[in-house]
Image (cartoon, helix red, strand yellow):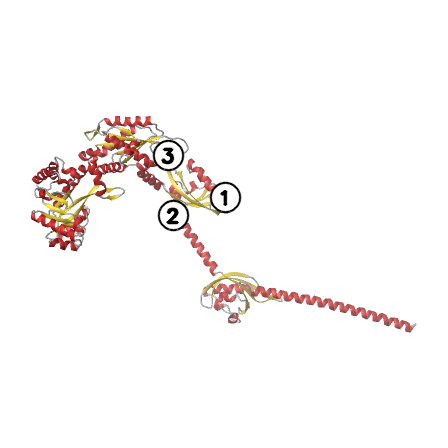
Amino acid sequence: LLSIIDEISFGILDVFLIFLLCIVVVFCIITSKRFSKQKKQLLLNEQYYRSLFEQNPDVVITFDLNGMFISANKAVSSIFGYSLDDLINKPFIPLIVPNDLEKALLQFNTTINGESSNYECSVYDKNGKQRKINVTNIPIYLNKKITGVYSIIKDITEHNSAQLNLVEAEAKYRSLVENSQVGVYILQEGKIVYVNPRLCEMTGYTYEEVIGFNLTNLILPEDLPTVHKNVQKLFTNEMISMTDQFRIVCKDKRIVSLEVFGSKIEYEGKDAIIGTIIDITDRKNTELMIKHMAYHDQLTDLPNRYLLKEKVDELIRESSEYPNVFSLLFLDLDRFKIVNDTMGHEIGDKLLVEVSSRLRNCLDEKDIISRYGGDEFTILLPQSTVERAREVAKGILTSLSNPLQLNYHEVFVTPSIGISMFPEHGLTYDMLIKHADLAMYFAKSLGKNNYQFYTNDLIDQSQHELDLEIKLRKALERNEFILYYQPQINLLTNQIIGAEALIRWMHPTKGIISPAEFIPVAEETGLIIQLGEWALRTACYQNKKWQDKGLPPITIAVNISAKQFFQSNLAEIVEKILFETGLEARYLELEITESMTMDVEQAITTLVDLKKIGVKVSMDDFGTGYSSLNYLKKFPIDKLKVDQSFIRDSTTDPNDETIVKTIIAMAHNLKLQVIAEGVETKEHVYFLLEQKCTEAQGYFFSKPVSTEEFEKLYIIEETRR
C-alpha cells in the first residue's frame, strides 16, 4: 500500500511539475510576445519621431541647459546656412542679432524653468545676412527633470516682408483712392457703402449724406433700367466687368454725365461692386458740339450735305419695308456771285442767312433744308408727292421774289430749282442729287427764276460735256481756278525776263485738272470768254503786285482764245483791265495762235487796236498752223514762239533742226523777237544760242509753278543781280 501510495504521490508531483512547467512556458511566451510588441511600438515611435524631426520643413534644434547645440534637423541649413557639424556643441548666442539677444536669453531661461515660450527675433546666417525668425521653445523632460530645450524655428523673413509690403500697398492704395481725381465707389445690395472725396465733390453731397444712398436716389429714371441690368449681370457673373454711361442729379439739381467702371468683389463678407467714376459732362457737351458742327453749316446753322445724305439714306432704307415716295429739291441763287463781288462777302453772307430764314418759312417741321455749299441749298420733302414738291417750289419762288433789305441795301435774288423724285428718278442719294442738280441747271438755261423736274430727256444730251460745263460754271463761281507761272529766261544772262500765265483748275476732290480737259468745253460753251477775262485780270494784278514789292518789272504773257480774240470790244476790255489793275501796257503780252489769223483782215484790225494800247503781241505755237508767210509781215506782232514739238527733237532730228533754224532766221529778218518753248536740256540751250535765239522757257529752267513758288524764284534771281 505504501509503495502504491508512494507511486501515486510521485505521479501527482510529476503532473504538478509538468503543469507548473507549462504555466511557466505559457507565461514566457506571453511575456516574450508582449515585450516584442512593445519593442516594435518603441521602434515605430522612434521612426515617427525621427521622421517628424528630420523631415520637418521647420528647423528643429535641441539645446542643453547652457544653450549649446546638441542636435538639429536638415532644415537648419536653410536658415543659418551652417551644417550640423558647424553648430554642434556651440552656443546659439553668437547667432543672435545684438538688439534681440536680451529677449532671446530671457525666453530661453523661461523655457528651462519649465514654461514654453514663443517670440520673434533676428539672427545672422553664415553669410552675415540678417533673417527674421519665429521661435517656439519647449522644455525637454527626462525623469521629470528638465534636461534641455527643443526649439522649433520658422523663417518669417519673406512673410514679414510681404506683410510690410501689403501694409505699404494698402497705405498707398488708400492714399491713391482718397486723393484720386477719379471717383471711387463700393456698391452693395443696391446701396452705396463707400465713396472717396472726389465722388462727393462730383455729386455735391458729403460722405455722410451719400453713404446708404440707393441708386434710384441719384440716377435719372430713364437711365436706371440699363444700370440695374448691368449690375445684375455682374452679381450673376454674366459679366466680368462693367462699363456704362449714365446721368445723375447732383445735390444742387445739376445733371452731369458719368462714365462708370465696375467689377464684382467681396466686401465685409458679402458680394459688392467696386469701381471708378469719371465726370464726362464736358466731353459729352463737346461731342454734341462737334457733331453739330460736323453736320451743320457754320454760317446758317442749317444741316449740311452730310446730314442730308444720312436722312435721305434713312428714307431709302425704310422704303424696303413699306412704300415711300419723297422729293429732293436742288436750289441755286441766280446772280449771287455778282452780289458777292460788288457788295462784299459780308453782304453776301447776310443774304445767305436771310435766304435760309425765308426757306425755313416755306417748309413744314418734318422737311429738311440744308446748305449744300456756296449759294446752293437742298430740300428734302419726306413722303412728298409731285404736287407737294411743285407747291413748295412755287412757294420758294414767291418768297424770294420780294427784295431783301441788307445793311441799307435792297437786294433782289432769284432761285433756280431742280427737283428729283424717289424712286422714279433714282434709287440712291448720289443719283437723286445728280438728277436734281441737272434739273436745276436746266432751269437756269430756261431763263432762271423757275423750277424744273428731272426728265430722262436731259440724259440724251452729251452727259460728259454737260457735267463738265456745270462743274466749270460752279468752279468759276467758287473761284476754283488759279494761275501758274512759267519763267521766261534770257539765255545770255540767265535772268528772268518774263513769265507765261497758265490757267489750272483746282478741283476740290480731283486736285489740279489740266487745261487740256476743260478748255475745249469752255470754248464750246462760251465760258472761255469769262475764264479768259479772269485769267487776264488776275495775271495783270499779280504782275503789278510784284512791281509794287520792288521787284524788277517783267512782261507777263497771257493766252487769248479765239472767241476772245474775235470779240469786237477786246481792246476795250484789255484797256479796262490795265486801268483797274494799274499795270502799264508794255508789261503785258497777249499770245495768239496762227489759227486766229486765218481771217487776215479781222486779225489785223484787232491787232492794230491792241497795239494802240501799247501791249505786246506774240504768235504762239508758230510753225504748227496755216498762216501765210506773205501776211505774217503785215501783222503788227512783236514776237514768235517756236513750238515745243520742234524744239524737243531739234538736237537729234535733222528735219526739226532745220525747221527751228528757219523760224529763228525768219524772225530775225522780220525784226521780230523769238522765244523757244519746251527747252529741256543743256543741248537745247547751246543749240538756241548758236542760232542767236536768246529767250526760252521750259522744264530745263522751271516747270509752271504757283504764285508763291514763282515769287521765290523771282526774289532769288533779284538777289543774284
Mark 1 or mark 3: name the one nearer the start of the chain.
1
Tag 1 secondary structure: loop
Give the residue number, with chain letter if any, for mark 3: 316
Amino acid type assigned to the residue bearing label 3 in the image: Ile
Indicate which disc residue 180 carries: 2
Q: State left or right for residue 318 relative to residue 415.
A: right
| Distance between mark 3 and mark 2 Cα atoms | 50 Å
Q: Return the x and y of residue 505 as percentages of the image width and height.
A: 22, 42
**Quarter in which the N terminus is drawn:** bottom right
Crowding at dot 1, Cα within 10 Å, few <14 / some 14-19 / many 20+, comes out as few
| Residue at the image position 30 percent from the left and 27 percent from the top | 392
Label 1–label 3 contact, CB within 8 A: no
Q: Which mark is residue 710?
A: none
Instruction: Find out whether the residues at labels 2 and 1 contact each other: C-beta distance under 8 Å.
Output: no
Numbered badge on residue 236: 1
* Left or right, residue 86 beside residue 375: right
Q: Secondary structure at mark 2?
A: loop
